Image (cartoon, rainbow, N blue to C red):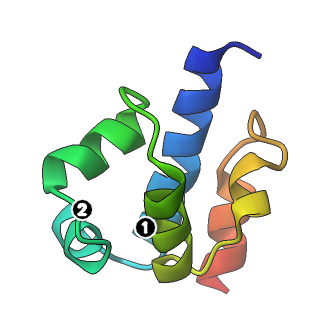
């Protein structure tokens, strides 16, 4: 897997979890003390989050770091379905 694919998959995991929690990018940005632009860049795979930011995002979205990296190419709908239950 290329670094570009990894960044895209991390962003997709974060976006799916944020959506499942019904948070806006602005709400997530405020919760992790980052800008909306930074969250947008992370979710689009334009830039990877620093580990401390990734950890904060996971805490807000009820994810673990392994959730972000396990089966990164897998369809996000499974994780989203679990969160919506």
Outermost residue on the top side: it is 2
* Residue 35 - label: none
Q: Which secondary structure lies at badge 2?
A: helix
Name the side, left or right, on which 73 lies relative to 5: right
Tell me the crowding category of disc 1: few under 14, some 14 to 19, or many 20 or more residues within 10 angstroms, Cα based. Answer: many
Q: Residue at coordinates 83% horizontally, 50% vertically from top-left?
A: 70
Q: Is residue 59 above or below residue 44?
A: below
Q: CA distance from mark 2 to mark 1?
A: 8 Å
Across and down, in percent, residue 27 comes to 21, 75
Name the side, left or right, on which 29 lies relative to 2: left
Q: Residue at coordinates 68% horizontally, 54% vertically from top-left?
A: 68
Across and down, in percent, residue 54 comes to 51, 58
Tag 2 near tag 1, CB within 8 Å: yes
Residue identified by numbered label 1? 18
Q: Is residue 82 above or below residue 43?
A: below
Q: Residue at coordinates 24% horizontally, 68% vertically from top-left?
A: 24
Name the side, left or right, on which 23 lies relative to 53: left
Tell me the crowding category of disc 2: few under 14, some 14 to 19, or many 20 or more residues within 10 angstroms, Cα based. Answer: some
Outermost residue on the right side: it is 71
Across and down, in percent, residue 23 comes to 31, 75
Residue identified by numbered label 2? 25
Tell how many labels.
2
Q: Quadrant of residue 26?
A: bottom left
- First in residue order: circle 2 vs circle 1: 1
Image quadrant holding the N terminus, namely top right
Q: Which secondary structure lies at badge 1?
A: helix
Across and down, in percent, residue 67 comes to 75, 61
Q: Residue at coordinates 64% horizontally, 73% vertically from top-left?
A: 63
Q: Is residue 48 above or below residue 57?
A: above
Image quadrant holding the C terminus, namely bottom right
């Amino acid at each position: 897997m290329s670094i570009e694919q990894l960044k895209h998959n991390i962003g997709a995991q974060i976006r799916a979890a944020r959506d499942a929690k019904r948070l806006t990018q602005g709400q997530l940005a405020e919760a992790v003390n980052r800008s909306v632009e930074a969250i947008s860049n992370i979710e689009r795979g334009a830039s990877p989050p620093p580990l401390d930011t990734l950890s904060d995002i996971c805490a807000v979205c009820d994810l673990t770091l392994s959730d972000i990296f396990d089966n990164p190419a897998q369809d996000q709908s499974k994780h989203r379905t679990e969160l919506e239950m």
